[in-house]
Image (spheres, grey):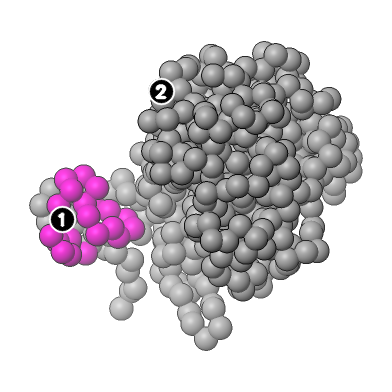
Amino acid sequence: MRSVYVIGIGITSFTRLEYPLSEIAAYPAMMAMKDAGRKEIDHLYVANMGSGRVNHQTGLASAVVDTLSLTPAGAEAIENGPASGASAIKTGYMAVASGVHDVVMVTGAERMREVNNLEATEFVATLTHPLAEYIYGVTLPSLAAMFTRLYMEKYGVTERHLAMVAVKNQNNALKNEFAHLQQEISIEGILDSPEAMTNNPYVAEPLRFFDCCPVSDGGACVILASEEVARKVERPLVRLAGVGQATDTHAVHEREEPTDLLAVRRAAAKSFEMAGLAPSDVDVAELHDAFTILEIVESEEVGFFPKGEGHLALERGETAIGGTLPINPSGGLKGRGHPVGATGIAQAHEIVHQLRGDAGERQVKDAKVGFTCNFGGFGNNVVCLTFVRGN
Amino acid sequence: MAREIYAYKCRKCGHTHYPYRMVCKSCGENEHNEFDQVPLPKRGKLLTWTRAYSLPADFEVPSLGLAIVELENGIRMTGQLRVDDPRMGMDVRGEVEIVRREGYDERYGMVFYEA
């Protein structure tokens, strides 16, 4: 297999966007082509989850390739729920590594604010098992809440730990001009003050409003290329060194150990194995914190910390920018926002900035190895990526 | 007649699945429909629960109790929970009732009460 490099990146603001979905996908693609200094693209993958249901538009890849005047290049959409973004990157990786294509554009977009919050929650809930979960009114926040209660009971995670993740990530987002949430928060305001229950009500007990990512519009793009092409691009080399994916039971109640996220563990292990690296080699990570509990649990399952000790590393400040292993310096899903199809690509976008050394105020010092975890369903389909600076 | 929700028992290895899948997860038996339907028990222990306040538009109620219950035979299932003061590990009993209305469609599922 050939080595695969990221030669260009682009992103939109994650917020409510008033332009069409195809343009939300195309705008970061134009930025990425400018970043790479080239317009020749062999193939296009578009990551998206809800265009048919939420935006009444199907065949999104055909719309995007034409919007960009990249026809007659091949193009298709990749749907893997909230892990669509990393799935599309993985597909692009295979296209370049195999030698089928030399330059592949992977762009992701979602326009979820077209509908109200209840309809957006309902749309995401269609990920759940139709007969065993969905009919009951089960949503992603409620699955995360039931999981959180088990985790609290077993490992001593508290609402304070969850609030610490929220504060860390949302305040990291203040250093990211593209992030959705631009509001500083404190433990006092969301947990300790007399107004906390008003500021931060339960969404699904024990998860509160500030434990959940916002519903966002947004797009992000990476351009992948062979080494021969990458050497001609005037950007620091960033190599996509490992891709790993794993699945788990569709219905969450069927998991043998209900506090495990086995697909995260297995996807991470495959990604590290392909890269020839270990979790201890990672300098900066973007984990899928759609709910605050997930950052803690994923930090354990991918191998950064022992099982049940992620919240202790958080307490010690290890996961803050300036800590030994900064997690979600971009703000994560919690602060940057979560336009589902774009999220996995936005994670990669942040890691490329970090490894190039141009992440500005949120730069992790001398980052050489970066890692992303993109979590689909409630952990039933997970894609992990490992990136390395230079060769 | 009391309504039932069914689990699926593999005719080859006896492994019982809920919900249905077409290929046995335990033995990989791949003949079409080689499962016997067995009713899920109605009693079990509350494994975990939540009260959800942000609900899909079909639910015109302010909040909804949801639970994962470990049934008497060890199989787990998700259902609605109507208990005032839920405690992990408490005994619950289930009844099959209407759990969702989608237009004129009525969907039946398990609702758990304090045993």
Amino acid identity at mark 2: Glu
- What kind of secondary structure does the magenta stretch mostly adopt? loop
Residue at the spot 15% in from the left edge and 55% down from the top edge: B30
Residue at the spot 76% in from the left edge and 25% down from the top edge: A358
Residue identifier under label 2: A273
Residue at the spot 33% in from the left edge and 66% down from the top edge: B5
Residue identifier under label 1: B30
- The mark closer to the camera, 1 or 2, is 2
Which sits in the foreground, A329 or A73? A73
Which sits in the foreground, A43 or A24? A43
Mark 2 surroundings within 10 Å by alpha-carbon count, few (fewer than 14), some (14 through 19), many (20 or more): some
Chain letter for mark 2, please. A
Chain letter for mark 1, please. B
Q: Is residue B19 magenta?
A: yes
The magenta-colored residue range is B16-37
Which sits in the foreground, A58 or A208? A58
| Secondary structure beneath label 2 | helix
Q: Can you say whether A124 is above or below B107 in the image?
A: above
Q: Is residue A356 visible?
A: yes
Give the quadrant of the N terminus of chain B. bottom left
Mark 1 surroundings within 10 Å by alpha-carbon count, few (fewer than 14), some (14 through 19), many (20 or more): few
